[in-house]
Image (spheres, rainbow, N blue to C red):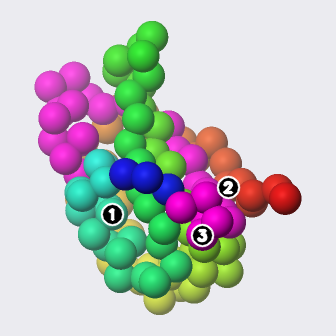
Amino acid sequence: MLIDKNKWGYVIVWEFRPKPGSEKRFEEAYGANGIWAQMFQQSDGLVATELSRDAKDPGRYLTLDFWTSKSAYEKFRAEHAAGYAVLDAQCESLTEFERELGQFEKVG
């Protein structure tokens, strides 16, 4: 998926390690057309969601969720807090490790 560089202003980056044997289901859930992206698409502030696998460590993944702005992301989280929590709990069984690496604003 191509990201419109003029459209996004905020990105959230997560690191994951799927449980062994869960990699395919993890990729389906967290990929650009997965259930997370489908939920995020309920907001007009989402620009794109990307899933990347580490070339040197294939058990390590990053998700990048591109938003038009921090306020668009925060509005989405406030409006969909319950659904987000349910989906997070649902997908917990797919991973053995996850952490938010950061939330970044575009400079310039």
Q: Does 107 sit left or right of 20 as displayed?
A: right
- Label 2 and label 3: CA atoms lie apart by 17 Å
* Residue type highlighted by circle 1: Ala
Residue 21 placed where, x, y %? 15, 25
Q: Quickly name the residue at label 2.
A: 103
Q: Quickly name the residue at label 1.
A: 37
Residue 58 placed where, x, y %? 35, 18
- Label 2 and label 1: CA atoms lie apart by 17 Å
Residue 69 placed where, x, y %? 66, 74
- Image vertical order of residue 58 relative to residue 78, above or below: above
Contact check, label 3 and label 1, Cβ < 8 Å: no
- Observer-nearest residue: 44 or 103? 44
- N-term mark: 2 or 1: 1
- N-term mark: 3 or 1: 3
Q: Quickly name the residue at label 3.
A: 7
Label 2 crowd bin: few (<14), some (14–19), many (20+), radius 10 Å? some
Magenta region, residue range: 4-29
- Label 3 and label 1: CA atoms lie apart by 17 Å
- N-term mark: 2 or 3: 3
* Residue type highlighted by circle 3: Lys
